[in-house]
Amino acid sequence: MKRIWFSLIFLAAAIALCTFEQIEVHRDFHKVIDTAEQALAADNMEEKAQCCEQLEKEWEHIHNWAAMTTDHSILHGTEVAVAQAVEFSKTNYIDETDEAIIEAKSELEQIHDGTLIKIENIF
């Protein structure tokens, strides 16, 4: 009987940990994707540069969590896209900045979709 309780406690802990991880992933990724959308919608370069700086800060926070559960080659592409967006936002290349932001947003959405617990991700 003690073995069953021991197993149930560990099962409850695993479910709680998975639930916490999914809530964090959902909240953090939607926050950073919203920041990327704000950067795309920004009219002037100064506002776009501020949004890109915020995007980079939020990405660094997510990167620390995602590095534990996601393939690093996938994370590298997003890191490059975010860095390009920040660098282009410091110049007057608005088209290149938007392209880098779109690429970063796409990469972030792919990582988010890949980390959700869904049947297609399990199998």
Image (cartoon, helix red, strand yellow):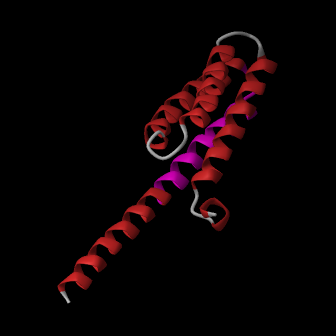
Quarter of the view holding residue 117: bottom right
Which residue is at 64% across, 41% downward?
Answer: 108
Query: Relative to residue 118, is residue 79 depicted above or below?
Result: above
The vertical placement of 52 against 91, above or below, is: below
- Screen quadrant of the C terminus: bottom right
Q: Locate residue 104 relative to residue 31 in the image: left or right.
A: right
Count of numbered circles on the image: 0
The residue sitting at the right extreme is 95
Residue beneath the point at 47% across and 39% down: 67
The residue segment tinted magenta is 23-44
Residue 22 lies, in percent from the top left, at 49, 59
- Main SS, magenta residues: helix
Residue sitting nearer the eye, 32 or 80: 80
In the figure, 84 relative to 114: above or below? above
- Which residue is pictured at 41% across the width and 60% down the height? 20
Name the residue furthest left.
Answer: 2
Nearest the viewer among 116 and 72 is 72
Give the x, y percent position of residue 75.
Answer: 57, 35
Q: Nearer the viewer, residue 64 or 50?
A: 64
